[in-house]
Amino acid sequence: MITKTPKVGRRSFIIGSATVGAGLALGLKIPFGASVVRAQDGSPEITAWVVIRPDDTVVIRIARSEMGQGTLTGLAQMVAEELECDWSKVTTEYPTPGQSVARKRVWGDFSTGGSRGIRDSHQYVRQGGATARVMLVQAAADTWGVPASECSAANSVITHKTSGRTTTYGKVAEAAAKLTPPANVSLKDPKDWKLIGKSVKRLDTMDKLTGVQVYGADLKLPGMLNAAIKDCPVFGGKVKSFEAAKVTGMPGVRHVVPVGDSAVAVVADTWWQAKTALDALPIVWDEGPNAQVSSATIAEMLKAGLDAEQAFVGNQNGDAKAAIAGAVKKIEAVYAYPFQNHAPMEPMNATARYTEDRCEVWGPTQNGEAAFAATLAASGLPADKCEFYKVHLGGGFGRRVAYQDYVTQAVLIAKQIPGTPVKLLWTREEDMLHGRYHPVMQCKLVGAFDASNNLTGLHMRLSGQSILSAVRPAALQDGKDPLTFQGLNATGDFAIGYTIPNLLIDHAMRNTHVPPGFWRGVNINQNAIFLECFVDELAHAAGQDALEFRRKLMSKHPKHLAVLNAVADRAGWGKPASRGVYRGLAQMMSFNSYVAACAEVSVTAGNKVKVHRIVAATDPGYAVNPAQIERQIAGSFVYGLSALFMEECTVKAGRIEQTNFHAYDSMRIAQMPKVESIIMPSGGFWGGVGEPTICVAAPAVLNAFFAATGKRIRTFPLKNHGVQMV
């Protein structure tokens, strides 16, 4: 794609990529293409986002990662909208982070997490398309010797309105690529969008259906060897010794190598040979002091935090403690949420080839730049001698955002076998034992009422892990982790939807040796359960309808209220449900989108729950591809309900106990409820889609379960209480 890569120092890039690794907004002015830059097939690049081939094929560059969520198609729609190209001739490709660094990060942020793929890049990718359109039109006008103002573009065809002459993008692309890009371009008014907002088919579906799509686990290179790895099962432990001689004679085995100070890998002709030998390899671990930790000791540590004096305040108004002390009636509850693994269907993997003057890595990552930084750090080479080639992910859910441990491991193995490509593939067991888990959390809530059953105060004390403490300590704010308060803030992308006269929400930080990570939806998941189930408890204690109780607290939060009203109206709240069916509500603001759900469930034998229907509403500001939003809502409910009913990672002797899907289950197709999506974009802002709705499914179902049984369950998953999903 480029012919020369300027030298970039390894240290300067790694330091500069710290922000990228955390997935934070960059605030950069994104430049466009320079003199003619060519794609690998020789076609000219018009802007960094647009390559036009002579046959009018439009190649749109996508910096974000595709892992099933549809960001690739959505971003292509946005570029194509402003480009005015023929959508049927659009294809896509990933630029590499090495190319981006060499071109002063022309493609912006590569990180794909936090539902930011579209909402954080919509402006500059549309500018990339609009700039290319202007340049193509100008090239045609120059050819005809007419003013560009007399020309228009549509469907990859440029027309001179006065003479009726036409040409195509492919015919003028070469000339357009030589023009100086305009400094400023105008973007379309949303009312004029023709492609954005349309439910077009995904661009990656056919390759997946036909098996053409190559994932990291599928990758094959000439002369490639395969590696399997075992890390110390206790986080923080090390390798004490291993007996390589015991397995070096086994079929296909080529190497037995240490990986850092905590892991050992076997490299063989095939992966199964490597895995079989690794299972037979005698390894002695130094498990360290963390081997004494258990789920029980972690729970006790968190429990102590519920009443600790010191806590970080996330949201406060009035005097909640005084209101509670003077309350006519107090309601109190304690909730707890467990560790959970991302468990993507494709385990962690990466393929690396190392020589003294070049290191290349291929693999699935949610952040190409963070993977590139890991490659530099592990290889010890400068940026101009390294590259990371991104492939589609077989699932991400946050596991492959900030943590690139599998990339580091692949490079460290390849360094010991110079010149030979080595594909590292984790077993499912390794993936379960060495995840980066949904943070464990407890929450104590106390609500206060006056004599008229008005809510006068609420104290919500969180006690548990901080993700930023583990992932990016520099992002802490005087020791406080702002991400802990997702959905509970006074303002911003995760604002609370209630006005309470006296409010205190704080966090007693209690970190464990089990590393936390950004698990799809992140802290909004447990916070939604804590808040929305407790609001239901408060409504019940006040003898008020759950919807009306909420409405009284939401008059100053019209967008929160709009989605709540939408699901209540669609579900028929206030009207009798079918016999034996009960309803529950939940609403939140998540990733700058407003979301709500109404669940309908039935319960038989006291513990068998059938979720019949979930009505879900979302206001993401703008809806780029409504059909894809519907799929994301339904898919998020699979993740959220599986977590609610079945999924928990427990700790014994310092290690995770669940090693495969037999102990870490997921809901089946037959258990999936009917999902009715209400997409209600109000415009004026950009919200996320992939993660927001996951948070409302669980509390809506829990509140419906209470309506059906009169039982409140406050610790999860529900299987621990004998409650099954049918």
Image (spheres, rainbow, N blue to C red):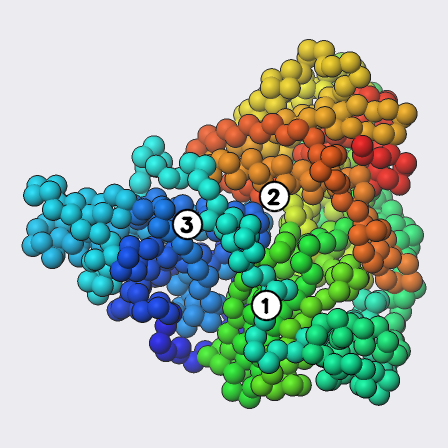
Q: Quadrant of the C terminus?
A: top right
Q: Quadrant of the N terminus?
A: bottom left
Is residue 474 something one can see in this rendering? no
Q: Residues within 10 Å of mark 3 (few under 14, many from 20)?
A: many
Residue 696 lies, with reference to residue 227, above or below; the image says above
The answer to whether the residues at label 1 and label 2 have Cβ atoms under 8 Å apart is no
Look at the numbered disc 2 and give the secondary structure of its residue.
loop
Instruction: Name the front one of labels 3 and 2.
Output: 3
Q: Earlier in the sequence, mark 1 or mark 3?
A: 3
Q: Which residue is mark 2?
A: 691
Residue at screen point 36% across, 46% down? 88
Q: Which residue is mark 3?
A: 76
Look at the numbered disc 1 and give the secondary structure of its residue.
loop
Residue at screen point 84% across, 38% down? 718
Q: Residues within 10 Å of mark 1 (few under 14, many from 20)?
A: some
Q: Which residue is mark 1?
A: 219
Q: Left or right: where does residue 381 sit relative to residue 458?
A: left
Question: Residue 178 placed where, x, y %?
Answer: 21, 65
Q: Earlier in the sequence, mark 1 or mark 2?
A: 1
* Residue type pointed to by label 1: Leu
Q: Left or right: where does residue 5 sit relative to residue 464?
A: left
Question: Residue 346 placed where, x, y %?
Answer: 67, 58
Is residue 507 something one can see in this rendering? yes
Question: Residue 92 placed where, x, y %?
Answer: 42, 56
Considering depth in this image, is 526 or 157 the residue closer to the camera?
157
Q: CA distance from mark 3 to mark 2?
A: 20 Å
Residue 356 lies, with reference to residue 319, above or below; the image says below
Q: CA distance from mark 1 to mark 2?
A: 29 Å
* Residue type pointed to by label 3: Ala
Question: Residue 388 placed where, x, y %?
Answer: 53, 70
Q: Earlier in the sequence, mark 3 or mark 2?
A: 3
